[in-house]
Amino acid sequence: MLKIPKPPDFDEKEVKEILKKYYGMEVEVSPLVGDIGRNFHILDKKGREYIFKIANEIENYYYIKAQNDLLIYLKSQNLDFELPSLIKNREGEFITEIKDKNGKSYNSRLLTWIKGDFLAEIEVDEELLINYGRSLGKIDRALENFDIPYAQRYWHWDLKNLLELRELTSYIKDMERKRLVEYFLLQFETEVFPEFPNLRRSLIYNDANDYNVLIETGKDGKKRIAGFIDFGDMVHSYTIFNIAVALTYAMLNKDDPLHVAYLILKGYNGIFPLKEKEISLLYYCIAGRACLSLMMSSYQKEIRPEDTYITISEKPVGEFLKILHSINPLRAEEVFRSACGLGKVKIGLSRENLIELRKKLIGKSLRTHYKVPVRIVKGALQYLYDDEGRTYLDCVNNVAHVGHSNPRVVKAAQKQMAILNTNTRYLYDFLVRYAEKLVKKFPEPLKVVFFVNSGSEANELALRLAYTYTGRKNIIVIDHAYHGNTSSLIDLSPYKFDGPGGAGPGPYTHKVIMPDTYRGPYKRNDKEAGIKYARHVIDIIEKLKEEGKGLAGFIAESLLGCGGQIPLPENYLKTVFKAVREAGGVCIVDEVQVGFGRVGTHFWGFEIQDVVPDIVTLGKPIGNGHPLGAVVTTPEIAEAFNNGMEYFNTFGGNPVSCVVGMEVLDVIEEEKLQENALRVGNKIIQGFKELQNRYPVIGDVRGYGLFIGVELVKDPETIEPAPELASEIVERMKEKGVLLNTEGPYNNVLKIKPPIIFTENNADQLLTKIEEVLRSICKN
């Protein structure tokens, strides 16, 4: 763990005495802010200004001398801006060893003061930014072939050491910021670190932050670069890091940060041309510096809570990371390349070739979304990036439950993949550790787990358990339900067997109407609606009994997905379960889409209904995109399945899958994502209800947490479905950078099932853009 001692403890009186003793100066002293050292403004009797710098104990004599040598060299290069000049003490030395009141020694220096306004505190114009880039280019050009032995040092502000400081993320208290930092550290590790051998190295300034760049305004009103200060972070490192540091801080608090970067790079590249490889990594280097800034401020805040200076950039950098996250890296790279006079980035196959090959090589029954399919090249938590530089807010991919490329899940999978991946015929801890962790989320008596690879496999196994336990085959399902893609599940899924290409229900499938209190016969204002809908299940049970047929079970999602994002009415499952069990059947709940905290109020959707199923199936979010599924059942049902026929699944429950599953559970719990789903989901639901008051095409708004349906109608009285409108909204939202899709028997329901890391700001984005689309459509 990084350990930085507190800054030296000297007061103004002590500094006055030091300057008199070692420099023969009578001065006025006032304290200045600083990072790890102690700085003072000095004013002598002739009105001349200086800065007196006392270095932290981790900066030894040779590191300070290296800084001095760098300044002396740069001042010899006839640069058109100022740098501090070193002042010798009475002994003719630039470095003076001083002692504090406890006798501890520190290295100190006196330098000239440069007048000007901080770049951070002025309004910048395009000419200034271009000239700023030129000045940075001049520094890097001057240092390209200059080296100092003691600049080859380990320094915590050197980006090449970023990944070694990963543990500092533990000091970041804001969960969204921490997640973003962890995400960008993963990207730095993936994109930048492997390219280190291919990058130019040189001595770099490494600290052109907006409080180290001074600006002066001429009599003509034009702003120019007055000078640069504080070379304490200079180090021999990768050259690209210097401009990355400068861009990071210059882009803070800007309406169009990419344009700011464009102007600076245009000036910089004109003096010191960048290599294409460096340009391709610049986005991630900028993100890396922003992460390092947040990590260091969070760490130092713990050890120096009284020092407000160390957190001066914390808030703007935190906000900047969110903005950077919303920018497609390809878009950023194209802007950077344009600034350097280069053309567009080439990404793999052309879109035309990709579509042609897909038609030729992939079965045509596998379809794409949208009139013009989106080509996704990268996932970034709640965002998806396409091949044309566009960013999409993902409001529909519920598989990436804790975010696309969630850094914790990715790292867990990578680590275990490098150690062991085998099958359940061998003993390994992760199988039972994950099973134990998972069943703790369930009420009694759901305490036995079977691991599989998908929701379809889970539902297939659930059927086998039901058949074996009851000795029967008849299953009751809800209309328009979808439970998986195997042959037996297609026979059990009205969404498929009643749809295009369907052949009707299987011989043991019995369908009941959807308990839809908006469109069905029993409405939301009917307190007995749940019981009345359950009566349709009871009718089938009684009919089977009359025909001398036994019931194996009833299967339903705890909230209906393909049916149109429909919450079940109160007492529906409670009444159904009672009847099914009395008939000797088992109650299966499909949590493949809605489980793992998505509904916000509970971890599992079935808990909303105050019931305990006999079998629960899990998939989609369980592995955050890793192929993983599970069946959780009772010891009694599991034991009945132990009838001599071995159940073996080659990949089900393998060590990598178990580690991934455990990490997903940990992320949900530690980042309080169930609570987040409830808070953000309520905001979205309330927002759509307010829109419903202004736009009568919104017939119904329903859901729990981040499982939401918005039903669109032509007329709020007749509630005639409006599938064309729903489709148009989806297409227009895509053009606005928001991914949605439709669901329901009439494809007129907007389904909203984003990753549960979705933020309140994301909710505002969604609601703002949907209103823009509604306003445009309704006006026309």
Image (cartoon, helix red, strand yellow):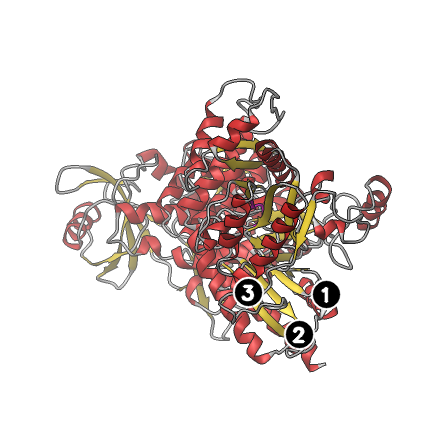
Is residue 373 among what the camera can see?
Answer: yes
Q: Is the N terminus in the top left, top right, bottom left or bottom right quadrant?
A: top left
N-terminal of the two: label 3 or label 1?
Answer: 3
Q: Amino acid at mark 3?
A: Arg
In what element is the residue under mark 2? loop
Which is closer to the viewer, label 2 or label 1? 2
Q: Are marks 2 and 1 in contact (CB under 8 Å)?
A: no
Amino acid type, label 2: Ile
305 vs 544, nearest the viewer: 544
Find disc 1 in the rendering and name its residue.
727
Q: Which mark is residue 702?
A: 3
Q: Which mark is residue 719?
A: 2
Horizontal and vertical percent position of residue 528: 50, 65
Q: Residue at x 25, y 45 (%)?
A: 7
**175 over 651 or under it: above or below:** below
Q: Residue at x 54, y 55 (%)?
A: 324
Residue 537: % across, % down? 60, 53
Q: Secondary structure at mark 1?
A: helix
Mark 2 or mark 3: name the one nearer the start of the chain.
3
Q: Is residue 589 in the magenta section? A: yes
Range covered by the magenta-colored residues: 588-593
- Residue 109 at least partly seen: no
